[in-house]
Amino acid sequence: MTRTRIIVAATAALLIAGLSACDEDGSAGASGTVINDAAPETTQARTEPAPTEETGPDQAESGGTGSGEQGSGEATTSPDGSAPDEEPSSQVCKVADLAVTVQYVDSAAGTVHQALRFTNTGNRTCEIQGFPGVSYVGGDDGHQIGKPAGRSGDKGPAITLDPGSQAWAPLAAPRPENYDEATCRPQEARGFRVYPPQEYDSVFVPLPLTACSNTEAVGNFLTVRTLQEGSPS
């Protein structure tokens, strides 16, 4: 029994000494797990700045307008989307650009030939093309008399009107006395209501005359042709 106790005591003493030595140099823990003094190798997370209203991903690639390296490019469009300092393209002539007058040309075979003249009185170049809308109007309320003018011929090419330049459309009106009263149903007109091509606004052109008002008659009491460049000879 004495020998066994001596062996157990010696073994216990050796274990205690080993544990004390490990604790002193810090190379091992009480659990027996080896701890590495160096930090484990890791991959540092790469963060990107969040897109903002000024420098989004798409603007960064194309040279946006934001601050910093991504926004070093200059803006290539103005707020309305057009290129800066770009000359405006030619546009359709509006009522505000035009002065419309009527000019007598001649009379033949019982028909009065007139010219509707469109003069660019604005300060920009514009384009005009096709058939104007024309009808007789009368009374203080400017009500339409009869049918609007019928169209004759083909639609012509676009005409560029520089400020001060003109285009004109031939207008033909058979004389009311060519018809019996029941067919014509004559009324006194104050002039014409004229719509420039591709326009929804009209202009009143004064010209007192007698007009046929029968909307059920066969044929036209007023006929217009497509616009031509310049003025009637």
Image (cartoon, helix red, strand yellow):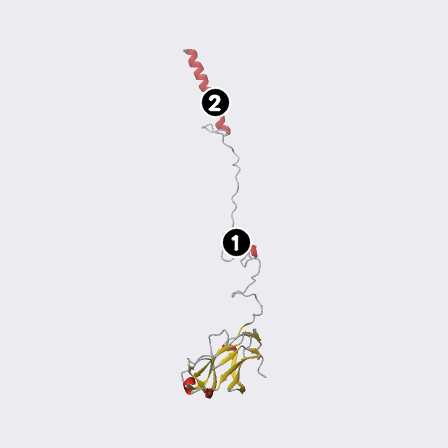
Reading the image, the residue beneath label 2 is 17
* Relative to 84, residue 212 above or below: below
* Residue at the (47%, 20%) spot, across then down: 14
In x, y percent, where is residue 146? 43, 81
State the separation of the CA atoms marked 2 and 1: 65 Å
Q: Amino acid at mark 2?
A: Ala
Q: Earlier in the sequence, mark 2 or mark 1?
A: 2
**83 above or below 123?**
above
Quadrant housing the C terminus:
bottom right
Q: Is residue 195 visible?
A: no
Badge 2 density bin: few <14, some 14–19, many ≥20, Cα 10 Å: few
Residue beneath the point at 42% across and 11% down? 2
Query: Which amino acid lies under the numbered mark 1 shown in the image of this protein?
Result: Pro
Q: Is residue 44 above or below residue 5?
A: below
Nearest the viewer among 10 and 179 is 179
User: Which numbered marker is on residue 159?
Assistant: none
Mark 2 against mark 1, which lies toward the viewer?
Answer: 1
Task: Tell which of 200 and 3 is nearer to you.
Answer: 200
User: Mark 1: few, some, or many residues within 10 Å (few <14, many ≥20)?
Assistant: few
Q: At which x and y percent is residue 55?
A: 52, 56
Q: How many marks?
A: 2
- x, y percentage for residue 202? 47, 78
At mark 2, the secondary structure is: helix
Front residue of 47 and 105: 105
Asked whether the residues under the numbered discs 2 and 1 touch, taking CB atoms below 8 Å apart as contact, a structural biologist would say no
Confirm whether residue 18 shows in the render.
yes
Front position in the image: 52 or 89: 89
Residue ID for mark 1 = 57
* SS for callout 1: helix
- In which quadrant of the rendered view does residue 155 lie? bottom right
Where residue 119 sits in the image (x, y, percent)?
Answer: 54, 80
Task: Give the quarter of the figure containing the N terminus.
Answer: top left
